[in-house]
């Protein structure tokens, strides 16, 4: 099984479409979105082709393949138009005999971790900066942002398969970092 992890679409129809095309090309079984789906928020510039209604339509069309977590820019009104759950502050996923704890990052993050067993993997977005870090008790993964990357990082996503975490640029689908988990 193959997972694709993305975060921080922020209403960009352009990058949502790229993300979905990439998901299909990657042959992933599930797309995990770590929050901030429809709105750009007050601290971000408008992303390319800002069109939340188009994003709603694109994601609703693939609702069976999504697992989403609530971001700080996601609200109850979003759930009224999205046909898949988006309001969980965190989720837990058993994948390849590893426990993945999924969150957006504005509450629980690399330095304020969820209560989780040793050896778990914590994933969050929010910072718009991709990162992989191994700690004594857990592994941390941030896929960055598909639409509004920060700190000169690429428009990025992550593929998890076979005990590996691969960071890729959504513009080129080129791998730029690989780690064993």
Image: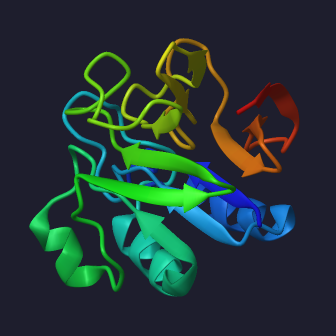
**In front of the other: 83 or 45:** 83
The colour scheme of the drawn protein is: rainbow
Residue 21 vs residue 131: left or right? right
Residue 73 vs residue 138: left or right? left
**In front of the other: 145 or 179:** 179
Q: Is residue 161 above or below residue 114?
A: below
Q: Quadrant of residue 77?
A: bottom left
Quadrant of the snapshot with the C terminus: top right
**In front of the other: 27 or 56:** 27
- Which residue is drawn at the image coordinates 72% and 48% (left, top)? 160
Position of residue 24 measured from the top left corner of the image (x, y, whole percent): 78, 71
Position of residue 150 measured from the top left corner of the image (x, y, whole percent): 50, 20
- Residue at the left extreme, as displayed: 76
Position of residue 54 measured from the top left corner of the image (x, y, whole percent): 45, 74
Q: Is residue 100 above or below residue 24?
A: above
**In front of the other: 44 or 97:** 97
Quadrant of the snapshot with the N terminus: bottom right
Residue 90 vs residue 146: left or right? left
Q: Quadrant of residue 146?
A: top right
- Which residue is drawn at the image coordinates 57% and 78% (left, top)? 65
Residue 166 vs residue 79: left or right? right
């Amino acid at each position: 099984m193959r997972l694709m992890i993305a975060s921080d679409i922020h209403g960009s129809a352009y990058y949502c479409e790229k993300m979905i095309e990439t998901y299909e090309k990657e042959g992933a079984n599930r797309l995990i979105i770590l929050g901030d789906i429809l709105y750009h928020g007050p601290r971000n510039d408008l992303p390319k082709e800002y069109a939340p209604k188009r994003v709603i339509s694109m994601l609703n069309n693939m609702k069976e393949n999504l697992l989403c977590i609530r971001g700080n820019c996601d609200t109850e009104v979003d759930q009224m138009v999205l046909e898949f759950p988006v309001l969980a502050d965190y989720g837990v996923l058993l994948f390849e005999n590893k426990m993945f704890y999924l969150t957006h990052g504005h509450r629980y993050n690399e330095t304020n971790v969820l209560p989780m067993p040793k050896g778990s993997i914590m994933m969050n977005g929010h910072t718009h900066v991709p990162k992989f870090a191994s700690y004594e008790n857990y592994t941390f993964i941030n896929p960055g942002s598909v639409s509004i990357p920060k700190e000169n990082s690429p428009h990025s996503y992550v593929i998890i398969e076979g005990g590996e975490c691969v960071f890729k640029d959504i513009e080129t689908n080129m791998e730029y970092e690989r780690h064993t988990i």
